[in-house]
């Protein structure tokens, strides 16, 4: 099977982008606005926070969902990647395998503009009026180093590859039915980055689940939490406090909306693969 993350999600994404006038207004609002990698916004636990990630038009969900889960589990790992050079350029440090099997650092320098379909600014602005753009910086640097500078991510990327290049640790890949609820709970408790992604929905059961829970095909989601049956949780889409009637999983959409909350058994049926790696 040939897979391309986000290729199946582009039509859905386009329908959410609004009219050309809304896009124009957004572009005008960002013209010459000063920028900075990191801002601790209202409600953020750290300068690097999962809610900073807002995918726009590029097919970079494999990168941005990975950034989202690392931001949750070990924000310092991301903050240590970016050097602001003070001249409008940023140096991003990735990890690559050396011939002897060890991990070695590779530096990639990028500059703006971070526009078009690049990841949106987080919405956090510091006292100097600078907007936070760390997701777009890494998104651009990753494309430059590992996608032959294909900034549009026309062929997508595997989250496992992104994890290894960011964390310098071997990633694990498994089918969802090979990852039990207890396994997933342990991964998150251990601080692992976890991304689940979909391929096409080949069966009628998968198609029905995708429609029921609003899941996009060819798209990657960070796994933010699992909720045991009988436990209260907050629905990320509505803000309501709910009680799980069965074991549940919560998946964050890198679009910044459209998160998925579903029974774990349905997750194992609907999703295609789970990628994970230690963040510490």
Image: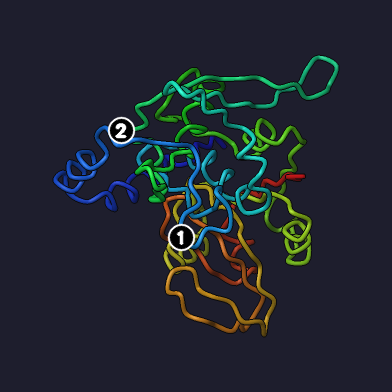
Q: Residue at x 44, y 53 (%)?
A: 216
Position above or below: 237 against 47: below
Image-quadrant location for residue 257: bottom left
Q: Classify the position of the N terminus by image quarter.
A: top right
Pointer 2 with pointer 1, Cβ within 8 A: no
Q: Identify the residue at horizontal 47%, vertical 50% (top origin).
A: 52
Distance from the alpha carbon under mark 2 to that under mark 1 = 26 Å
The circle on residue 89 is none
- Residue 206 percent across, percent down from the top left: 52, 60
51 lies left or right of 125? right
Kind of element beneath mark 2: loop
Which residue in the structure is indicated by mark 2?
A: 116
* Tag 1 secondary structure: loop
Q: Residue furthest top?
A: 99
Residue at 17% from the left image edge and 41% from the top image edge: 24
Q: Could you say where residue 145 lies in the image, as x and y percent from the top left?
A: 55, 20
Task: Name the foreground residue: 244 vs 42.
Answer: 42
Mark 1 surroundings: few (<14), some (14-19) or many (≥20) residues within 10 A: few
Q: Earlier in the sequence, mark 2 or mark 1?
A: 1
Note whether 170 is above or below 266 in the view shown.
above
Residue pointed to by mark 1: 42
Q: Is residue 17 left or right of residue 76?
A: left
What residue is shown at x 30% (from left), y 33% (from top)?
A: 116
């Amino acid at each position: 099977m040939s897979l391309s993350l986000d290729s199946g999600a582009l039509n859905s994404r386009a329908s959410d982008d609004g009219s050309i006038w809304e896009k124009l207004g957004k572009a005008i609002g960002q013209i010459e606005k000063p920028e900075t990698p990191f801002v601790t916004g209202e409600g953020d636990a750290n300068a690097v926070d999962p809610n900073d990630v807002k995918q726009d038009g590029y097919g970079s969900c494999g990168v941005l969902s990975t950034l989202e889960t690392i931001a949750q589990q070990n924000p310092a790992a991301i903050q240590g990647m970016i050097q602001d050079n003070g001249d409008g350029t940023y140096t991003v440090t990735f990890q690559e395998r050396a011939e002897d099997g060890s991990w070695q650092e590779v530096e990639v320098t990028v500059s703006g503009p971070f526009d078009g379909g690049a990841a949106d600014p987080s919405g956090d602005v510091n006292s100097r009026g600078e907007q936070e753009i760390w997701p777009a910086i890494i998104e651009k640097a990753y494309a430059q180093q590992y996608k032959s500078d294909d900034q549009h991510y026309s062929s997508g990327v595997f989250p496992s590859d992104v994890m290894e290049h960011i964390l310098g640790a071997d990633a694990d890949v498994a089918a969802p039915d090979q990852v039990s609820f207890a396994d997933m709970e342990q991964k998150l408790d251990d601080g692992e980055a976890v991304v689940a992604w979909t391929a096409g929905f080949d069966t009628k059961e998968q198609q029905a689940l995708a429609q029921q829970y609003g899941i996009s095909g060819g798209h990657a989601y960070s796994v933010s939490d699992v909720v045991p049956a009988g436990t209260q949780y907050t629905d990320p889409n509505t803000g309501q406090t709910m009680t799980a009637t069965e074991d549940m999983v919560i998946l964050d959409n890198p679009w910044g909306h459209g998160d998925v909350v579903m029974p774990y058994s349905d997750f194992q049926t609907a999703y295609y693969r789970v990628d994970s790696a230690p963040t510490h």
